[in-house]
């Protein structure tokens, strides 16, 4: 069991010296996957979290992995062992869950890629610690108490690293990123569904440049 700083190492590989924004991506049409990923990478956003909220999630991971240079593509909304294994088979380079369960935490011990479980309480954080998980998703960040809650958790657990997600936007992202233990932030403001549906890829690229 050795989860220590694996996602942080991935960040250093793809975005050295930066605390990246992880777009939380919902693929409604599979033909949008590649041009969307290209637009994000062109704007300096290399980490792409493709959620499993639609039927196209796994196929989108495969296509982006095979066709978009410079993208580090992972899977989000992973909620059970079957999805965990399917994402690995699709080539996902990291896995993210909205929450944590003993089953998923145990299953992640042998994962070849970083796994970030979602936590919102000290009890969930302590469960993650029991399985050696030191890099966590703080979710839903704003709804769970925002920066004051995250700082309260860091009091007894200063050695952990977090990717806050949920309610993060252009106005508060840098406030989170100013915290030493925040390694990245997750959000969807850099690739809003309205722009994706209209295939306004250049507008998405510009949003990414501003965010980064």
Image (cartoon, helix red, strand yellow):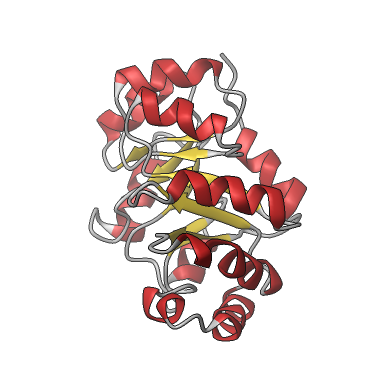
Q: Look at 62% across and 24% down and name the residue there.
A: 112
Image x and y of residue 86, in percent:
47, 30
Q: Look at 61% across and 51% down and name the residue there.
A: 63
- In the displayed structure, 48 sits above or below 121; it is below
- In the displayed structure, 180 sits above or below 198; it is above
Q: Is residue 161 left or right of residue 145?
A: right
Q: Nearer the viewer, residue 88 or 130?
A: 88
Q: Is residue 48 left or right of residue 146?
A: right
Q: Nearer the viewer, residue 169 or 72?
A: 72
Q: Nearer the viewer, residue 123 or 46?
A: 46
Image x and y of residue 126, in percent:
34, 25
Image label count: 0
Image x and y of residue 11, in percent:
67, 48
Q: Look at 56% across and 13% down and name the residue there.
A: 1
- In the displayed structure, 28 sits above or below 83; it is below
Task: Classify residue 143 by image quadrant.
Answer: bottom left
Q: Is residue 12 left or right of residue 113?
A: right
Q: Do we see residue 123 in this rendering?
A: yes
Image x and y of residue 32, in percent:
51, 67
């Amino acid at each position: 069991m050795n989860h220590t700083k694996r996602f942080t190492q991935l960040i250093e590989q793809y975005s050295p010296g930066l605390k990246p924004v992880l777009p939380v991506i919902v693929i409604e049409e599979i033909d949008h996957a590649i041009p969307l990923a290209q637009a994000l990478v062109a704007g300096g956003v290399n980490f792409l979290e493709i959620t499993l909220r639609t039927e196209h999630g796994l196929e989108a991971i495969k296509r982006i992995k095979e066709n978009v240079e410079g993208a580090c593509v992972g899977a989000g909304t992973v909620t059970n062992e079957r999805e965990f294994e399917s994402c690995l088979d699709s080539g996902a380079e990291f896995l993210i869950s909205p929450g944590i369960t003993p089953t998923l935490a145990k299953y992640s011990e042998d994962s070849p890629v970083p796994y970030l479980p979602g936590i919102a309480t000290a009890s969930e954080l302590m469960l993650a610690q029991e399985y050696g998980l030191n890099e966590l998703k703080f979710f839903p960040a704003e709804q769970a108490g925002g920066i004051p809650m995250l700082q309260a958790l860091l009091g007894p657990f200063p050695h952990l690293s977090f990717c806050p997600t949920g309610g993060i936007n252009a106005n508060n992202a840098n406030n989170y990123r100013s915290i030493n233990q925040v390694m990245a932030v997750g959000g969807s403001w850099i690739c809003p569904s309205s722009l994706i549906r209209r295939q306004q890829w250049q507008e998405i690229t510009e949003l990414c440049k501003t965010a980064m």
